[in-house]
């Protein structure tokens, strides 16, 4: 800490003031009280050599103060680690922010290219790519604006649903229901999951509810080791003989690939008497 002489016979408050990196004048009274042992007080002294935590415990006899015990603990390493964590957290958030900005730039370029293409199929493919990139960017935006290392996926899900509805020509006719909560998820789960959910919602709006039906229900649940998301629409239903494994639909291929390889989960699309139900289960 920079004190090379004997402590015996010196005023501890004066010693602390002389070695402290920060001027202690503003806390003069509190420091004096704490280091004199007049009251139970904790004081932290820091300089370029390290950080020491001092705890003064008054010694009383018959109600009179006869001295004090001062406990000193070297907390230099602890404070260094705390600063590293703060720096690391800020760096990670900045990275997520930059990734989000870069993804938004890519989306803008794709939208610009889409407007210049005369082929409707090519333009539609670019617009689908923009939608998928937006889903990934949303997760990074959530991580960049939060001090937490996890993703509040219920908020992400709400925004994914809202964004999908904005793109639907039947936006004003559809009724959306939400049930349950997923809570916080690890980013390695949240990123592919946002893509999977986006594709399933988009598939329900674009195919199931394109001309008939008006209800979309999203139910989520979570137990100790698994989570489940069910997306139901009361539209025209799946065609006879439909097989997810054999489907040539790019969106559903993305759903199956991400579910199996990234989420390590299972996905089923089933025809029900009243519509179509997608059942997604994955470990958390």
Image: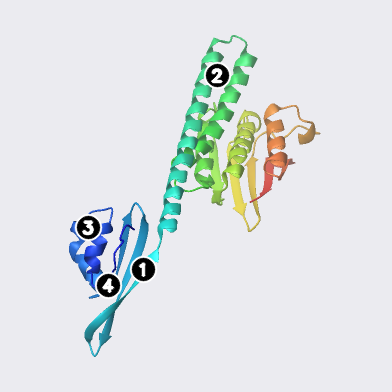
Judged left or right of residue 212, residue 37 is: left
Q: Nearer the viewer, mark 3 or mark 2?
A: 3
User: At numbered mark 4, what does the secondary structure look like: helix, strand or loop?
Assistant: loop
Q: Which residue is mark 4?
A: 8
Q: Residues within 10 Å of mark 4 (few under 14, many from 20)?
A: few
Residue 224 in sight from this viewpoint: yes
**Which is nearer the N-term, disc 3 or disc 2?**
3
Q: Which residue is mark 1?
A: 72
Q: Which residue is mark 2?
A: 110
Q: Residue furthest bottom?
A: 62
Whole-number angstrom distance, CA of label 2 to CA of label 4: 74 Å
Q: Residues within 10 Å of mark 3 (few under 14, many from 20)?
A: some
Q: Evaluate if marks 2 and 4 touch, with contact meaning CB atoms under 8 Å apart.
A: no
From the top left corner, tell me how far across and down residue 80 is, in percent.
Answer: 43, 53
Q: Evaluate if marks 3 and 2 touch, with contact meaning CB atoms under 8 Å apart.
A: no
Whole-number angstrom distance, CA of label 4 to CA of label 1: 15 Å
Q: Residues within 10 Å of mark 2 (few under 14, many from 20)?
A: some
From the top left corner, tell me how far across and down residue 192 is, in percent.
Answer: 62, 38
**Residue visible at 68% across and 47% down?**
281
From the top left corner, tell me how far across and down residue 175 is, in percent.
Answer: 54, 39
Whole-number angstrom distance, CA of label 1 to CA of label 2: 62 Å
Q: Which mark is residue 24?
A: 3
Residue 242 in sight from this viewpoint: no
**Which is nearer the N-term, disc 1 or disc 3?**
3
């Amino acid at each position: 800490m920079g004190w090379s002489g004997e402590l015996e016979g010196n005023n501890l408050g004066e010693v602390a003031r002389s070695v402290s990196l920060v001027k202690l004048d503003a806390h003069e009274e509190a420091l004096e009280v704490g280091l004199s042992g007049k009251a139970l007080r904790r004081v932290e002294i820091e300089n370029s050599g390290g950080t020491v935590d001092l705890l003064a415990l008054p010694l009383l006899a018959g109600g009179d103060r006869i001295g004090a015990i001062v406990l000193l603990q070297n907390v230099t390493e602890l404070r260094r680690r705390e600063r590293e964590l703060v720096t690391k957290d800020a760096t990670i958030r900045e990275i997520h922010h930059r990734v989000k900005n870069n993804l938004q730039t890519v989306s803008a370029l794709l939208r610009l290219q889409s407007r210049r293409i005369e082929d409707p199929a090519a333009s539609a493919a670019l617009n689908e790519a923009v939608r998928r990139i937006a889903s990934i960017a949303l997760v990074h935006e959530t991580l960049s604006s939060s001090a937490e290392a996890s993703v509040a996926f219920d908020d992400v899900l709400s925004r994914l649903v809202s964004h999908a509805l904005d793109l639907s020509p039947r936006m004003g006719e559809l009724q959306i229901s939400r049930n349950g909560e997923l809570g916080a998820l690890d980013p390695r789960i949240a990123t592919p999951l946002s893509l999977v959910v986006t594709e399933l919602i988009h598939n329900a709006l674009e195919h199931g509810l394109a001309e008939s039906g008006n209800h979309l229900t999203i139910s989520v649940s979570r137990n100790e080791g698994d989570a489940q998301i069910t997306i139901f629409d009361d539209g025209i239903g799946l065609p006879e003989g439909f097989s997810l494994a054999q489907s040539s639909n790019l969106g559903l291929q993305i759903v199956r690939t991400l579910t199996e390889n990234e989420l390590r989960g299972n996905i089923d699309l089933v025809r029900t008497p009243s519509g179509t139900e997608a059942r997604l289960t994955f470990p958390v």
